[in-house]
Image: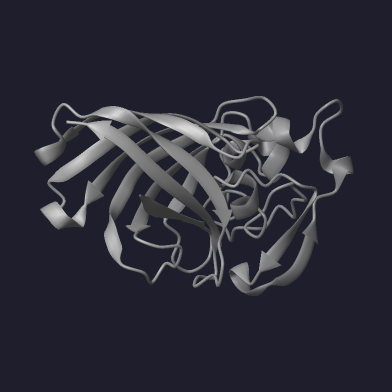
Amino acid sequence: MFFMHDILGGSNPTARAMTGIVNSPAANGQLPFAKPNGAVLPYNNGVPQNNNNNGIINNNNIPFLTGLSGTTSNVAQNNGINGGFGNFPINSGQLQPGSVLQNLMFGTMSVFDDELTEGHELSSGLVGKAQGFYVVSSEDGTSQTMGFTAMFESGSYADSLSFFGVHRTAVSESHLAIMGGTGKYVNAKGFAIVKTFPASNQQTDGAETLLQFTVYLTY
């Protein structure tokens, strides 16, 4: 058993949203092909001017919207990300007619390089690292298809297991298949039971999701 710490936002993120809602002009208020900082591309090397967008997502709330915890409520709690505290509302009037926030998550892909530990705490014994991706793969935003490799420190990261499956945030646990491995886990077969826990005594200024993996395998 091990724990995976997925951190979006803050000063030391281990995951980053790459596609989907972050690139949607309707959601982020950007002009198509605009610079990612919200500035309009300058003309003839002029001074960039902010386009004063009022997009649904921004640097404060996107970590809460795209992470493995599946948080998609209309008001999220800001725990100091980018220096802010308190609630930052998402105005339902900003949503496209007939859509809900969960629908806008559909297709969003994030990549991650997360630490694996023995216990709940980020400072507990390091087991290894997990590198891969997750994609919001259901229209209601509650399922995320995950593919990643867990590399274990005990074998100088030569021993690894590869996981693939759907992580469902609306249920108490999910199952991921073990697709194989390297090192002493060559030809490994099995599955992992995955549970999501709130990050207790959070040791980061980002939005952390804590996943517990209980692994059953033969090799």
Work out whether residue 38 can be spotted.
no
**Res. 79 image quadrant:** bottom right
Q: Residue at x 85, y 25 (%)?
A: 98
Q: Residue at x 41, y 38 (%)?
A: 133
Residue 93: x and y in percent read 89, 42
Q: Which residue is nearer to you in this view: 197 or 87?
A: 197
Q: Which residue is nearer to you in this view: 11 or 199?
A: 199
Residue 215: x and y in percent read 34, 40
**Res. 116 image quadrant:** bottom left
Query: Viewed as shown, does residue 127 lie left or right of 182?
Result: right
Q: Residue at x 32, y 35 (%)?
A: 216
Work out whether residue 166 can be spotted.
yes
Q: Which residue is nearer to you in this view: 43 or 201?
A: 201
Q: Residue at x 63, y 43 (%)?
A: 70
Location of the C terminus (image quadrant):
top left
- Tally the marks: 0
Residue 20: x and y in percent read 57, 34
Query: Viewed as shown, does residue 182 lie left or right of 213?
Result: left
Q: How is the image coloured?
A: one colour
